[in-house]
Image: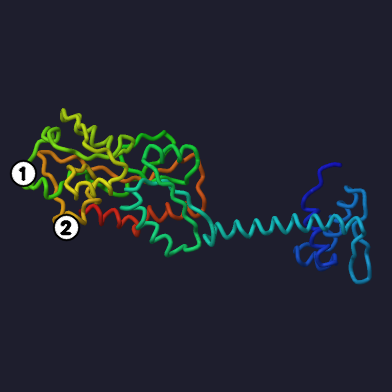
Amino acid sequence: MADINLEYYKIFYYVGKVKSITLAADELAVSQPAVSQAVRHLEEALGSPLFVRTSKGVRFTPEGEMLYSFVQRGYEYIQQGERKLREMLNLETGEIRIGASDMTLQFYLLEVLEQFHEKYPSIKVAVTNAPTPETLKHLQDGKIDFGVVSTPLYTRRECRVKKVRRIQDVFVAGKKFAQLQNQTLRYEQLTDLPVLCLEKNTSTRNYVDGFLEKNGVALSPEFELATSNILIQFARKGLGIASVVKDFAEEFLETGELFLLDFEEQIPAREFCVVTDQRIPVSAAAGKLLEMIEKEDIRSIYTKYNKH
């Protein structure tokens, strides 16, 4: 059987639905002869009559009734798909897949998502929590729409990187190390102190280690821990001097439970970045969130945190 124009099946569906050539033509906004011709072409292609003409319109032949039971389900399923697609394009439904580390989630993405959810409460957001290198791999594999990561990062040529917030790496300590407060230290002195660091598979650890190596310092941490929040708790207990991004310590710096160590040279600031792969199209919902990040309402977050 030769390929049949799918438009014929669409017209067949409407004729069968309203049982009338005239009413089907009205529904489709085409002429009655065009509808009659399409039905005739379909019947000829299939080798079977599908309708019997009556004074009130048309009725199915047995073959036409059987065919309609399948065409109806197929065409209405297509219509349902079109409705769902329109809902996604209108941001009435949809999903965003984001990759983020604990740090970028807590100190940037959470506030961004709060603003987005207020505007588009029906959009589902799935966040894959992983360090920067793993998040970039997820992006490359198409598992996420975009990643929110911290520098340093090494991306492929196809990636677009947008800086969205500045962060500062610091060393903090508790009252057990009060003798170091209000002193200007050299980084070499850290080698004689119990230092607490993140594990080596994180961008934060790599960045701080790289900076210290340039200053001739190689740390042998007392503890290597999975998250900065745990580092802060260890520092509060006096178990060592924690290498963290300052935001994690802010609460305890304000209360005086922790203090910043002052060095001759500050570790250069780095950034949170939103990374997309230009080869991979994102969902309509993800596109809207990225558009919001580009605009001033989200960019104000960057300004706010840069004042710290």
N-term-proximal mark, 2 vs 1:
1
Number of callouts:
2
Examine the rendered structure and indicate whether residue 283 appears above or below residue 51: above
Check disc 1 and report its element: helix, strand or loop.
loop
Residue 59 location, quadrant? bottom right
Residue toward you, 239 or 7 = 239
Question: Which residue corresponds to mark 1?
Answer: 183
Q: Which quarter of the image is occupied by the N terminus? A: top right
In the figure, is residue 18 to the left or right of 252? right
- Residue drawn at 75 percent across, 54 percent down: 74
Tell me the kind of residue under disc 1. Gln
Residue 78 in the image, given as x and y percentages of width and height? 69, 55
Gap between marks 2 and 1 measured at Cα? 19 Å
Q: Residue at x 77, y 53 (%)?
A: 7
Identify the image quadrant of residue 113: bottom left
Q: Who is closer to the viewer here, 273 or 182?
A: 182
Find disc 2 in the rendering and name its residue. 254
